[in-house]
Image (cartoon, rainbow, N blue to C red):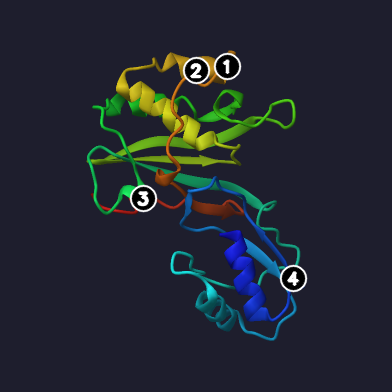
Amino acid sequence: MQGELIGALEGALKTRSFEFVGSGRTDAGVHALAQVAHLQAETMLAPHVLRMKVNDLLPADINVIQVEKVHARFHARHHATSRSYVYQIAQRRTAFGKRHVWWIKDTLDVAAMQQAAALFEGFHDFRGFTRDDPDEKSTKVDLLRCQVIDHHPLLVVHVVGSHFLWNMVRQMVGAIVEVGRGAMPASRISELLSGARGSLSWESAAPSGLFLASVQYDKEPIPEIVPTIRL
């Protein structure tokens, strides 16, 4: 997505002399409902005109929703106070939504999944739920919210945190699903968050179900979450 946006900006601005930075990276195959980026460039184009010109040059699956002027010091990544992710789990086969869900064929204990999700909330060391090297960077994250919302036959996992590590949300969802399957006790999540050693013994959730839902600045309220599709 970043490469497509940069190419469209070059075409709309008629220059390569600009700075373009997003609020964060996502894994390959992950979607973004409301990614935020800042652009520093010299142009006479009004924001709404720039938006239209960029959208004209973008592929159909990428769309710039809004362009507005901000303070010159604004930084899309460094100034974000929290980020919100949504993960969608389908409990039945879907013809039209398969690119936006992870279909789990096993019967899931939703109540157990909700209890497991709540264990992630708070300030923890998530080294057991990331592919980042804890010797290279801090793996401690303040998770503000982790909940499983039942929109049968769709389950929506809503996660809000100060920031996220590489593959973290997908590993968390994979663990929550293992609890729902009855293949792993929820106590294993508590053990890993407490610093217990061990390799990841569950399947990482498929990237197709994951969405960057929103990015908050200056303590903005976290939007309510609704499914992106109907099964």
Quarter-of-image position of residue 203: top left
- Point out residue 92 in the picture as x, y percentages from the top left corner: 22, 39
- Tell me the CA gap for discs 3 and 1: 35 Å
- Tell me the CA gap for discs 1 and 2: 6 Å
Mark 1 is on which residue type?
A: Ser
Which residue is denoted by mark 3 in the rendering? Answer: 99
Which residue is denoted by mark 2 in the rendering? Answer: 190
> Closer to us: mark 4 or mark 3?
3
Q: Is residue 220 visible?
A: no
- Point out residue 168 in the picture as x, y percentages from the top left corner: 54, 34
Choose the circle earlier in sequence order: 2 or 3. Answer: 3
* Contact flag, marks 4 and 3 (Cβ < 8 Å): no
- Quick one: SS at disc 4? loop
- Quick one: SS at disc 3? helix
Which residue is denoted by mark 4 in the rendering? Answer: 18
Q: Give the number of the disc on residue 202.
A: none
Quarter-of-image position of residue 21: bottom right
> Closer to us: mark 4 or mark 1?
4
Mark 4 is on which residue type?
A: Phe
- Quick one: SS at disc 2? helix
Mark 2 is on which residue type?
A: Ser
The N terminus, quarter of image? bottom right
Viewer-side residue, 14 vs 172? 14
